Structures are given as structure tokens and as C-alpha cells.
Amino acid sequence: MSGPGVGFEYPAKEVSWTKRDALLFANSIGCTASELHFLYELDPNFSVFPSYPVILAFKGTDQDVIDFYAAQNAVPIPGVPVFDPTRVVDGQRLLQSFKPLPPSSAGKRFELRTKVLGVFDKGRAGTVVDTQSDLVDAGSGDLYTRVVSSSFFVGQGNWGGPKGPATPGFPAPKDRKPDAVFEHQTTPETSLLYRLNGDYNPLHAHPAPGAKMGFGGVIIHGLYSWNWACHGLLQNLGGSDPANIKEYQARFASPVRPGDKLVASAWRTGQFQGEWEEVRFEVKVEGGKVCLSNGRALMKCAAPAKGKL
């Protein structure tokens, strides 16, 4: 694919994490005391939860609070307008796992190597920037994870760029009951805990940015809901074994507010890529809209499917 900004590579970004970071992340997305391999560093099977790498783009190597807006402003993309990072929300995330992360990054140098896949002008609504970020051991060159992200810059379109292609759809089946349903009651503190992982966007802590963007106040990180749902799939369909999920994605369809109740539904499809079964899922706010759509995972499932698509 060609177009403005396509192929631009950001400077490699060093990232790091500690066992404490892994414990905080697992706690913040809902891991339970029955999953001590995510929550207790001396467990013989202690593991970093497999979706943790999505936080590293925000965290970098920092162990303290950072200026989110300043960090987003760091590197402009050549050939496209400079977008306002105070008015950006997540569009979609895809995570592909190739190797499990070590319990901490100590003794290695890890880098995020990120390039632009596309910059798309959606008119008055805004602009979509698609990127690919590879988590690499800079010493060995080993690839651990790949994250494909879409960021939506609200109200920052109409600059004459390409509209972009249609994205693949993975709709949830409507003809049968889900194989798993799980839910969670969020609180006013949900995003205040999750942000301590390193995603310090003020949109998720103070009402002013959300009011400016038309959300009416604080909204919960889209990636909180995304990571929470990933944990729920692994817990309910994958036996809480981090080796049982290889690929995971969802689209951020509508905002979640503190105090909303999340309800996730997941369907096994009976369709396989090698040993990995495709699972479809969606997450709704109870009594309201779908907040995560286009949900798809490749998993090794631990329970029989109720039916096939």
C-alpha cells in the first residue's frame, strides 16, 4: 500500500518492565486469586499476561508518571498534517504473539520498532493513523509480539488524504447462544488504577478533556476494556493458560464510562488455523451499546464448542 506517510519508521523506542509491572497489569485487568501464575511472582509458572505488550508503547522505560500529550507530540509523520494529540482515541488493536515475554526485561534490551501502515482522511469525523509495532530483543533480533493499531484523531480530517480501504469484518454470530458470557462492574476508580500501567492520557482521569471531545467527561481506556476481555476469554475458554492465545483483536466501537457494567459474549467457531481455533466475541455496556466489536481471537480452547458458524 502507498500513500502519505506510508512506510515511515519512527525511531526505535527502548521499553522495559519489571515483575511488579506485570503484577500491577494483571491486577488491573481482573486476574483472580485462582490465577496466581499472573499474580504471584514466586509461582513456579509465573507469567506476564500475554496482552501486556500493548502498554509498552505508552510506558517506554518510565517508572513514573509521564506527560502523555508531550510524548504523543514527539515525532510528526512526514507528508501529513500535524494532528492534535489531545483529541485522539483508539480505533482498533490487533495483537499477534510469537514468543512469551520473560518475567521482566532485566538483562536484555527490548525495543519497539514502529512504522506507519496508512493515514486515512475520514472527512469531518477525523483522521485514522494505522501503525505496526514490533517488540524485538535488540540483541538477538527475536520478535516477541506485533501490535497493529488504529488511532482516530477526532475532528481532524478534510486535508485531502486517501479515504482508506474497508477493514475486514468478524461479526458475532446471531443464530446461537454464546459459548461463554462474562461480565464486570466498573467503578469510578477503574481507569485510575489501569492508568498506573503507563497509559496516562488525561481523558481517562479528569473530566475536562472528555468534555472538550464531546464525551461529557471521563471515559475508561478503550484498552482497559480490550485487555479485560482478553483476560475473560483466556480464563473462560483457555484455562487461564497464557500459551493458549496466539492472536487477539477488537475494534473500539463506543465509549465506556466509569460505573458502566461490561458484558462480554464469546463464540467458538469450529474453524481452525492449524491448532488454533477462531473465537468471535463482542462486549456491550449492559443496557447500552456494543463497546468492543469485530472481536476475534485465535485460541486453544479448553471447553467443547456449542455449535459452529
Image (cartoon, grey):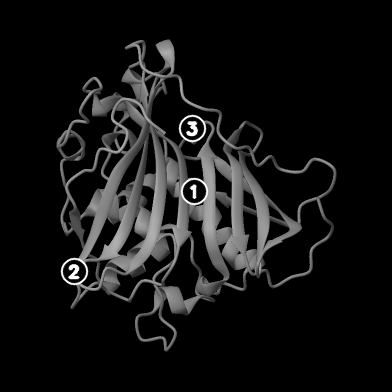
Q: Amino acid at mark 3?
A: Pro
Tag 1 near tag 3, CB within 8 Å? no
Tag 3–tag 2 contact (CB < 8 Å): no
User: Marks 1/3: CA distance?
Assistant: 12 Å
> Against 181, is 244 above or below?
below
- SS assignment at label 3: loop
> Is the residue 71 above or below the residue 198 in the image?
above
Asked whether disc 1 touches disc 2, contact meaning CB atoms under 8 Å apart, the reply is no
First in sequence: mark 1 or mark 2? 2
Q: Is residue 263 above or below residue 17?
A: above
- Residue that carries the numbered disc 3 in the rendered image: 255
Residue 277 in which image quadrant: bottom right
Question: Mark on residue 109?
Answer: 2
Amino acid marked by disc 1: Trp
Could you tell whether 10 is left or right of 220 in the image? left
Mark 3 vs mark 2: which is more N-terminal?
A: 2
On the picture, is 100 further left or further right than 186? left
Residue pointed to by mark 1: 226
Circle 1 packing at 10 Å, graded few (<14), some (14-19), many (20+), is many
Element assignment for label 2: loop
Tag 3: Cα neighbours inside 10 Å, few (<14), some, or many (≥20)?
some
Badge 2 amino acid = Arg
Please state the horizontal and vertical placement of residue 122, each as a whole percent of the image.
44, 18
Q: Position of residue 287 (x, y in %)?
A: 66, 34
Disc on the earlier residue, 1 or 3: 1
Q: CA distance from mark 3 to mark 2?
A: 36 Å
